[in-house]
Each structure stands twice: as structure tokens, then as C-alpha cells.
């Protein structure tokens, strides 16, 4: 997964939310329905951005398989670029994570 392409997509979503809020602030919307839709759309975009950023942090720190974030927009790579690429976990790493989660769940269940 390309970290640069992922962060660019997140930045674009934030820019889109900002544009929606500017339209609302400038009173360019046709009616109350459009205003409500603008507000709810902005909230939805920001909720998705927040979740995506948390998951990127988890993938960067090794707490989550980057494959779970893989999407069309972040599978790009450019020869010779200085991007950071997060590699998907191999089978051994995935099994280790599953064992770790199982141990944690057993501890929580035994309390």
C-alpha cells in the first residue's frame, strides 16, 4: 500500500468536506433539504476520514495488516519514487496476530 497515495486521498476528502462547508457558509444552497444534506454529507466524510486515519496509524505501527487498507487509489507505485510502501502481512505474521488476539480474548473472558 502506498502511504503517499493513501494520504493524498484522505487530504482530498478533507478538501471536499471543506468545500461543502464553504457552500453552506456562503448560503449557495437552494433550500433547507440541500443544507441538511450538506451538513450530513460533511459529517459522513469526516467520520470516514477519522476512521481511515486511525487505521493508517495502526498499519504503520504494525498493529493492523496494511492489506485491510488496500484499495484502488493506494495500489499505485512509481519507479524510483521516495514513497513509503506498507507490505501486506505474510501468512506467518497473520497467524502470529491471530494467536495474540486469541490470547487476549481468553484473558478477557477468564476475568
Image (cartoon, helix red, strand yellow):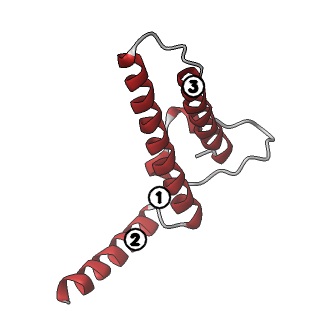
Identify the residue at image location x=76%, y=37%.
79
**Residue 51's x, y, as percent?**
46, 50
Residue 4 on image: x %, y %? 68, 43
Do tag 1 and tag 2 residues touch (Cβ < 8 Å)?
Answer: yes
Residue 22 picture location, percent across and down: 60, 25
Q: Is residue 57 shown above or below 3?
A: below
Q: Which residue is mark 3?
A: 25
Q: Secondary structure at mark 2?
A: helix
Outermost residue to the top? 30
Mark 3, other Cα within 10 Å: few <14 / some 14–19 / many ≥20:
few
Residue bearing mark 1: 65
Numbered tag placed on residue 84 in the rendering = none
Q: Quadrant of residue 32?
A: top left
Mark 1 or mark 2: which comes first in sequence?
Answer: 1
Q: Which residue is mark 2?
A: 97
Q: CA distance from mark 3 to mark 1?
A: 40 Å
Q: Residue at x 64, y 47 (%)?
A: 3
Q: Residue drawn 46% across and 61% down?
A: 64
Which tag is nearer the camera, tag 3 or tag 2? 3
Residue 67 position (above or below residue 65): above
Amino acid at each position: 500500500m502506498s502511504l503517499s497515495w493513501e494520504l493524498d486521498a484522505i487530504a482530498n476528502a478533507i478538501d471536499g468536506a471543506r468545500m461543502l462547508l464553504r457552500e453552506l457558509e456562503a448560503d449557495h444552497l437552494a433550500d433547507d433539504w440541500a443544507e441538511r444534506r450538506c451538513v450530513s454529507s460533511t459529517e459522513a466524510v469526516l467520520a470516514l476520514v477519522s476512521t481511515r486515519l486511525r487505521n493508517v496509524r495502526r498499519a504503520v505501527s504494525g498493529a493492523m495488516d496494511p492489506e485491510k487498507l488496500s484499495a484502488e487509489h493506494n495500489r499505485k507505485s512509481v519507479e524510483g519514487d521516495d514513497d513509503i510502501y506498507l507490505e501486506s502481512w505474510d501468512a506467518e505474521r497473520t497467524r502470529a496476530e491471530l494467536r495474540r488476539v486469541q490470547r487476549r480474548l481468553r484473558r478477557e473472558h477468564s476475568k
